[in-house]
Image (cartoon, grey):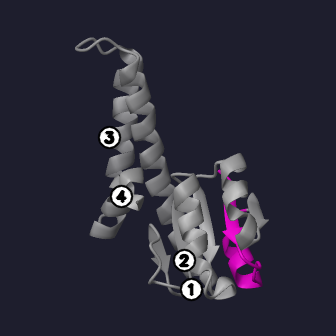
Amino acid sequence: MTHVVAGDLRRPLADALPDDVVTVDAAAVRDSVASDDPAVVVVDAATLADPAAAAVDDVRSTTDAAVVAVGATTLDADVACAATDEAAVAAAVERARHIAAYRRSVSDLYEACRERALGRPDEDVRERRQSADDQFASLPDDREAFAAALRTEADDG
């Protein structure tokens, strides 16, 4: 899973993120997420100031990645993380991973169902359904996580 961080990478934030982080400038975030298709995008609002909302909008208009806003709670992110310490950021990214995994499992199930005749599920569809059910069960048990997991592209408009 690739993580894209918009803005200058601050040391505490870098320490909290996995090794596979790709750092991009806010101006290039749309192109980066379009080419890399990450599951989670971390927007470092503290380093972006005013353009932070624009960076979140760019991500949302380009991909269905789970968006984590670090250093802000007012952005339209899937996971808001006001704190910027390593533990809080790591927890927020982990939360976003669960949301992204659920979304991906539902998309996989949808695609498998499209390929099957109505009323004739095969083992692949059953496995994908079980995977989606398992991912749903692993979501954090709160309203914000469920809302983020169920967000659709239509909700972004």
Give coordinates of residue 124: x percent, y percent.
42, 19
Q: What residue sits right under mark 4 in the picture?
A: 155
Q: What residue sits right under mark 1 in the picture?
A: 71
In magenta segment, residue 16: yes
Quadrant of residue 31 within the rendered picture:
bottom right
Q: Visible in this render: residue 90?
A: no
- Closer to the N terminus: mark 1 or mark 4? 1
| C-beta proximity under 8 Å, tags 3 and 4 | no
**Which residue is pictured at 76% across the width and 78% down the height?**
9
Q: Which mark is residue 53?
A: 2
In magenta segment, residue 122: no
Q: Which mark is residue 133?
A: 3
- Element type at mark 2: helix
Residue flagged by tag 2: what amino acid is it? Ala
Quadrant of residue 13 within the rendered picture:
bottom right
Q: Nearer the viewer, residue 134 or 68?
A: 68
Q: Nearer the viewer, mark 3 or mark 2?
A: 2
Q: Is residue 39 above or below residue 17?
A: above
Give coordinates of residue 111: x percent, y percent.
43, 27
**Which residue is pictured at 54% across the width and 87% down the height?**
83
